[in-house]
Amino acid sequence: MQNIDFNVVSNAYSRQRTMPNININSQPQDHQNEPAKNFMKIPEFLERYINQIMKVEFLTGNYIVEKIGRLIAAGENYIVLHLLEQRVIVICESSSIKYITILLDDSILSELKVYN
């Protein structure tokens, strides 16, 4: 049986852990007035997925309503979906949208029982 010197192990472990240098005398930086960089709003993001099939879930009262369709347009406070089940176009208010699932592979449609 091998003897282990726990003092050596403990010292080696404590040398690996180092605290970052923090200057407590430095002034905090005010990032409040700086514009956000590389921050994309939801309509800008959705514009990349025009003509893509997606599932959109809306919070209506205490219920989640699900719509599956092809994204036609995305505005500041609305999206336009071509619903695949009813073959209609619907304009949806974006403030009630809870989740958006973008289907990157159209082969999943058969599993959703939706016709293309």
Image (cartoon, rainbow, N blue to C red):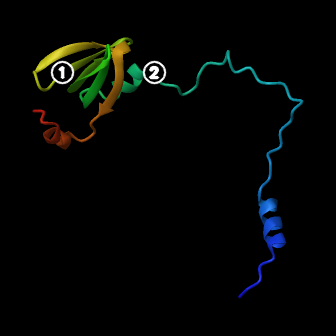
Q: Which of the numbered marks, if any, corresponds to residue 24?
A: none
Q: Which percent across, then down, holds residue 85?
A: 11, 26
Q: What element carries label 2?
A: loop
Does the rendering let one see residue 114? Answer: yes
Which residue appears at 45% of the width and 21% of the height? Answer: 41
Pointer 1: residues within 10 angstroms few (<14), some, or many (20+)? many
Where residue 111 appears, as percent x and y from the top left, is 16, 41
Q: Which residue is drawn at 38% across and 20% down?
A: 43
**Residue 93 position by quadrant:** top left
For residue 82, the mark is: 1
- For label 1, the SS is strand
| Front-most of residues 111 and 106 | 111
Note whether 17 is above or below 107 in the view shown.
Answer: below
Residue 75 visible to the viewer = no
Q: Which of 72 and 1 is in front in this view?
A: 1
Residue 110 quadrant: top left
What residue type is disc 1 on? His
> Is residue 30 shown left or right of residue 70?
right
Q: Mark 2 points at which residue?
A: 41
How far apart are the two marked residues, 1 and 2, measured between alpha carbons?
22 Å
